Image (tube, rainbow, N blue to C red):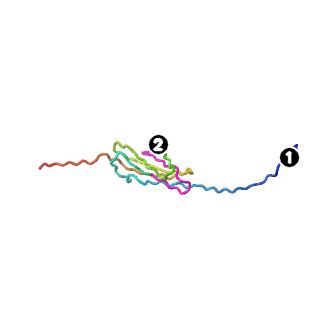
Amino acid sequence: DAEGHTTPPCTEARVSVSVAVDALPPRALFTCGPRPAAAVKTSWVDVCIACVDEASGCAAVVYTLNGGSPVSLSLANSSAVRITLGPFVHEQAVALVAWAVDNAGNAAVPIALSWSTDLHFPVSSWSNEP
């Protein structure tokens, strides 16, 4: 510059960074709930959905019930959720579709579970007539 200051020469620095890329989706599985195609005789049903992801870890489980809007449940500090569905007030076929999402944003292949509600309990009668 005009006052005689000089700029030191530029030096080149190289930095090596390793980045792990998680391109694999997680897996979702049902770990509790009604047997597939079972007739459930209760108005409330518990279902457990687990996530397995060895790379970035599991972020959430998402499910829909009978084609409704998706419900997302965070898996912070956990790898599974237990949901209670109901009350079912009349006989109906129920379809639950669920999938997991990992921390890299990959979504699992959806899994499905279906059952029917049968809220009519068997009736027996007895007669003591000859």
Give the Cα distance between marks 1 and 2: 68 Å
Q: Secondary structure at mark 2?
A: loop
Image position, residue 42 (x, y; %): 34, 47
**Numbered label attached to residue 57:** none
Image position, residue 82 (x, y; %): 43, 49
Q: Residue furthest left?
A: 130
Image label count: 2
Which residues fall within the magenta stretch?
49-70
At 88% from the left and 46% from the top, the residue drawn is 4
Q: Secondary structure at mark 1?
A: loop
Let me know if residue 108 is in the magenta part: no
The one nearer the camera, 7 or 92, is 7
The amino acid type, in three-letter code, at marker 2 is Ser
**Numbered label attached to residue 69:** 2
Question: Which numbered disc, 1 or 2, marks the residue that appears first in the sequence?
Answer: 1
Let me know if residue 57 is in the magenta part: yes
Image position, residue 47 (x, y; %): 41, 50
The quadrant of the rendering that contains the N terminus is top right
Q: Which residue is mark 1?
A: 5
When asked about the image quadrant of residue 57, the answer is bottom right
Image position, residue 80 (x, y; %): 47, 52
From the viewer's perspective, tell me whether residue 88 is left or right of residue 27: left
At 14% from the left and 49% from the top, the residue drawn is 128
Callout 1: few (<14), some (14-19), or many (20+) C-alpha neighbours within 10 Å? few
When asked about the image quadrant of residue 15, the answer is bottom right
At 34% from the left and 42% from the top, the residue drawn is 89
The amino acid type, in three-letter code, at marker 1 is His
Callout 2: few (<14), some (14-19), or many (20+) C-alpha neighbours within 10 Å? few
